[in-house]
Image (tube, grey):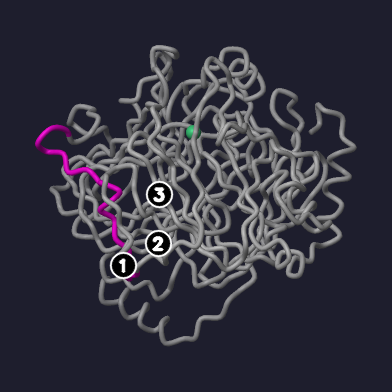
Amino acid sequence: MKLLASTVSAALLAIPVFSKTLPITLDIVNAQGAPDGFSRSMVTANGTYPGPLITANKGDTLVVTINNKLDDPTMRRSTSLDFDGIFVNTPDSFNEGSSFVTTCPVAPDASYTYTIPLVDGQSGTFWYHSQLSVQYVDGLRGALIVYDPEDPLKQLYDVDDENTIWQVGDWWHNTTLPLLAGYVATGIVPVSDSGTFNGVGRYNGGPEVPFHVVNVVQGTRYRFRIINTSARNVFTMSVDSHNMTIIETDGTPTQPMTVNSIDMLAGQRHSIVVEANQPVANYWINAPYVGGDPTRNLNQNATLSRAILRYKGAPAEDPAAPMSLGPAGAALNALVEANLRPLVAAPAPEPDLNITLNLVVTAGKAQWNVNNVSYLPPEVPTLVKILEGANSADDFNVTENTFVLPANKIVQVIFPPSIDDEAHPFHLHGNNFWLIKSNSSEEINTQNPIKRDVAGVGSTGTIMRFSTANPGPWFFHCHIFWHFQAGLATVMASGLDETRKEVQPTKAWDALCPAYDALPTDLQ
Ligand SMILES: [Cu+2]
């Protein structure tokens, strides 16, 4: 088998790789579902949670058409899709899906096609989700994998396919409009009822929904691609009796690093290699989570968040081992984010300018502030204002928290230490950043920092650098979407003149804002 596999891949490599256009249609529909055994109405792509897997090869062009058929009034009726972590060149920025930054949402009974060429040879593990308010909490999330037929780390694994993707996420029984109203009334972020692993989970007192099963063959090495699709929770990933060798972080190939426990914040991704080198049996894949005070939601039981690694030949039953939260004490060999190194070492360029961002919550309120400003989506999207001639920060509302930056510079963002108990996973759209200082360490690393697109901001401080060689209004926000919705967001708007020159939107895009603005509030 192995000989055959390597022969086939060698043959494939000999054939020139042509980039393709990949038409994908997603019907955005309300569907009844019970991922953790509790039946509720969801917002879905094609009726499933998670949504359909999207795969591409590097250099392909995604052509994703959404047909908005949402009709449940307990959730948002309009929608918009963001392709999280995908580099988007300036000319394509209008198709980037960020409501009120680069586009208006798509109205009910309307369709829209996002055309996004995959650029810069980017490959790796990504995902898509609604980027309208907290709508993705209702289920509109799915994996997007970009394969590299010439992956430099290919020799480290045998299998990397649709069965080796692990999507973990927080899950709520209520729909988002009432949850959001509760958050606004109390200032307390909703605590999830459960966690899901590839769309299934359990909660206290709920039915014993069968755990997701990952089938493996002894002696084989698997590339598992882990995506934390949460809107809040941090998941801690481990596999009983197995190590995990990290080879990718948010689309960046890494120097292989072997650990046995990985904390993943909302929006973060890793590829790991797991070798099925243990006796034929069933093993727990542990995926406990944290996110807020669990005593606020008695349904929550993080120990029930897990899946089963089943060797071929093992019986179809639960592992004999007790359900644990994963390695602890002396056995723990956890990922330290600051230790991640890119496969290709490169120093971060020196910064041309510095921005300091202070994150502060308004006590007792559902309101977060960046440098004393709580972000509010404008009525006219940032990109529309730029195309209409906006030239400086004064041309945007104060509450847009928009930083106007020159093109072709290196911007250093400094987050001083904050006093919150939860780290905020800050996410940059359309680009990634050099992580100069991780929240996990006091170390400053300008020599070979990891590049990623989501990193935690918390008690020790975080420093990032990004390039503005790819101008545009790029959303930069907390990926705890409750915080995002409460104002924890900024826009890094670089190269306004260049953006005007390069962006030539379609008539279909031009029509989105008038259509959305004409909707009654309950259809927005
Ligand atoms: Cu946050």
- Kindly indicate whether the residue at mark 2 contacts the one at mark 3 (C-beta within 8 angstroms): no
Q: In the rendered structure, which disc, 1 or 2, sits on the residue that comes first in sequence?
A: 2
Front residue of 464 and 93 = 464
Q: Residue at x 85, y 55 (%)?
A: 510
Specify the label residue 109 is tagged with.
none
**Mark closest to the chain's N terminus, 1 or 3:** 1
Query: Which residue was labeled with disc 2?
Result: 252
For this rendering, which residue is in front, 268 or 19?
A: 268
Within 10 Å of disc 3 (Cα), the crowding (few <14, some 14-19, many 20+) is: many
Q: Which residue is mark 1?
A: 343
Residue drawn where x is 75% and y is 37% of the image:
78
**Whole-percent x, y for residue 146 in the image:** 49, 63
Relative side of 78 to 167, left or right: right
Q: Nearer the viewer, mark 1 or mark 3?
A: 3
In the picture, measured across the screen, residue 109 lies left or right of residue 58, that is right
Q: Amino acid at mark 1?
A: Leu
The residues bearing labels 1 and 2 have C-alpha atoms spaced at a distance of: 8 Å
**For residue 330, side relative to residue 118 (left or right):** left
Question: Residue visible at 65% across and 53% down?
Answer: 404
Q: Which residues are magenta?
A: 328-346
Q: What is the spatial separation of the Cα atoms under label 3 and label 2, in whole angstroms?
A: 18 Å
**Position above or below: 75 against 124:** above
Residue 321 included in the magenta stretch of the image: no
Circle 2: residue type: Thr
In the picture, the quarter occupied by the N terminus is bottom left
